[in-house]
Amino acid sequence: MTDMPSIPTLSLPGGSGRMPKLGLGTWPMRGAECRRAVEAALALGYRHIDTAEMYGNEADIGAALAASALPRDALFVTTKVWHDHLTPSGIRAACEASLGRLRLDHADLYLVHWPSPAMDLDAVLGAMARLKEDGLARAVGVSNFPPGLLRRALGTGAPIACVQVEYHAFLSQERLLALTRPAGVALTAYSPTAKGAGEKDAALQGIARKHGRTPTQVALAWLLEQDGVAAIPKAAGEANQRANLEAASLRLDAEDRAAIAALPKGRRLVDPGIVSDWDA
């Protein structure tokens, strides 16, 4: 995957500052399954690995990273702090614990996993900024912030490099992208294939037939061609990992994009009830 494009807004001194546009999502894999999946992905050429303390798989990923013997600056590792740790001391302790499990001295990107109604936003973002200043994270950001909350966060002046949200062909994130692009903030799409929903969609099936690809590859290609957008599909098996990599070489045309744009865009698949109003 040496030619995988990266997002330049995360460019920092050293190679690991650039976030590859395609990464490996690891939720809900754990144990031997997770370690095998990460090892297989790294062998195929993946360099962007996404995890979180809540996933319970950081130690498995750490073991896979160590076994790969890849140089640290060849990797881009994202992890996240859970919403019950959103105090300055809690964030620091959670980050240090995550790094210990990952066997790393820094994360390439450290995110607030979910906002908490009880959090002090300024204090949270200040604590995240200090992680960056102290070298525990090369870049920091947020996840699952609706547009109104992201606007507030950006308004604090915090060094937010990325927002990670559910984004796929059946769920619009245009309001968030209208905020992130002018600010030079990356957007990482989780559940980018809508949990395989594209395989049953007639429009994506038609585009796939035209290009000799699969509907899932079409859905990924649509995201990967977008400015400032990365995607982290979960794939446990090597065949699916390889197919996802191959999506990066698919070039859609205007007719394809129009067909995807016409799909309903209100299908949210991940909503544990932590965010009270996604439209805020």
Image (cartoon, rainbow, N blue to C red):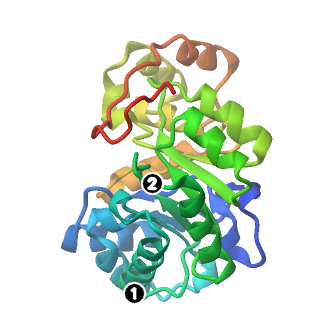
Expressed as whole percent of the image width and height from the top left, the position of residue 65 reads 43, 81
> Residue at left 49%, top 30%?
212
**Amino acid type assigned to the residue bearing label 1 in the image:** Gly
> In the image, which disc is placed on residue 32?
none
Q: Residues within 10 Å of mark 2 (few under 14, many from 20)?
A: some
- Above or below, 132 against 250 in this view is below
Verify CB contact (< 8 Å) between mark 2 and mark 1.
no
Name which of mark 2 and mark 1 comes first in the sequence. 1
> In the image, which disc is placed on residue 100?
1
- Above or below, 134 against 275 in this view is below
Left or right of 239: which side holds 109?
Answer: right
Q: Please state which of residues 83 and 212 is positioned toward the viewer in this rendering.
A: 83
> Residue at left 31%, top 56%?
27
- Mark 2 lies on a secondary structure that is loop
Expressed as whole percent of the image width and height from the top left, the position of residue 219 reads 48, 32
The mark total stands at 2
Q: Quadrant of the N terminus?
A: bottom right
- Residue 245 appears in the figure: yes
Q: Which residue is mark 2?
A: 119
- Residue 227 appears in the figure: no
Expressed as whole percent of the image width and height from the top left, the position of residue 221 reads 56, 37
- Above or below, 30 against 145 in this view is below
Q: Please state which of residues 75 and 80 is positioned toward the viewer in this rendering.
A: 80
Left or right of 33: which side holds 49?
Answer: right
**Amino acid type assigned to the residue bearing label 2 in the image:** Met
